[in-house]
Image: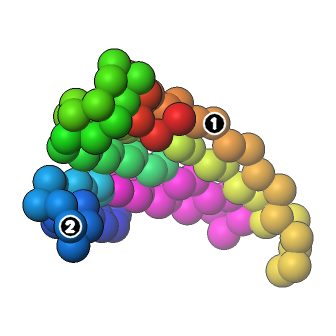
Amino acid sequence: MTVNSTAGHRSEQSNDFWGAYSVVGTHNFTDKLHYIIQHDHGFADNVQTNAGPNQNAQWYGITQYLNYDVNDKFTVGLRTEWFSDPDGFRV
C-alpha cells in the first residue's frame, strides 16, 4: 500500500487551502495476474464551482485495474472507475 498527499496554499497570491491524497493498494494473485485499487480525494477552499464563486469543493473516486501479463512485453487489462465531483469543480 502507498499513500501520497499534497497540501498547501492555492497560489502565491492566495492563502486559500487546497489539498489531495491518494491511497494505492496492489495485490499479485499470480505471477501474471495483478490487481490495483486507488482512492483519490481532493479539496479546495474558496473556489469557483457550479454553485458559484467562493465555495469550498471536494472530489473523490475509486479506480481499479486487473492486469494479465501475456508475456514479458504485452499486458492486457480491465479498468473500472467511479468518480464524484458534487461541487462541479474538477469536471
Q: Which residue is mark 1?
A: 80
Closer to viewer: mark 2 or mark 1:
2
Of residues 16 and 66, the one drawn nearer to the viewer in this rendering: 16
Disc 2 versus disc 1: distance between alpha carbons?
38 Å
Quarter of the image where one finds residue 14: bottom left
**First in sequence: mark 2 or mark 1?**
2
Q: Quadrant of the N terminus?
A: bottom left
Q: Residue placed at 83% from the left, 56% from the top?
A: 76
As for residue 43 lying within the magenta part, the answer is no
Q: Residue type at mark 1?
A: Thr
| Picture coordinates of residue 19, whole percent (x, y) | 24, 56
Q: Residue type at mark 2?
A: Gln
Q: Can see residue 7?
A: no
| Magenta-tinted stretch | 22-36
| Picture coordinates of residue 27, whole percent (x, y) | 49, 58
Chief secondary structure of the magenta portion: strand
Quarter of the image where one finds residue 48: top left
| Picture coordinates of residue 8, whole percent (x, y) | 17, 66
Q: Residue placed at 48% from the left, 49% from the top?
A: 37
| Picture coordinates of residue 2, whole percent (x, y) | 33, 67
Q: Which residue is mark 2?
A: 13
Q: Residue furthest top?
A: 51
As for residue 26 lying within the magenta part, the answer is yes
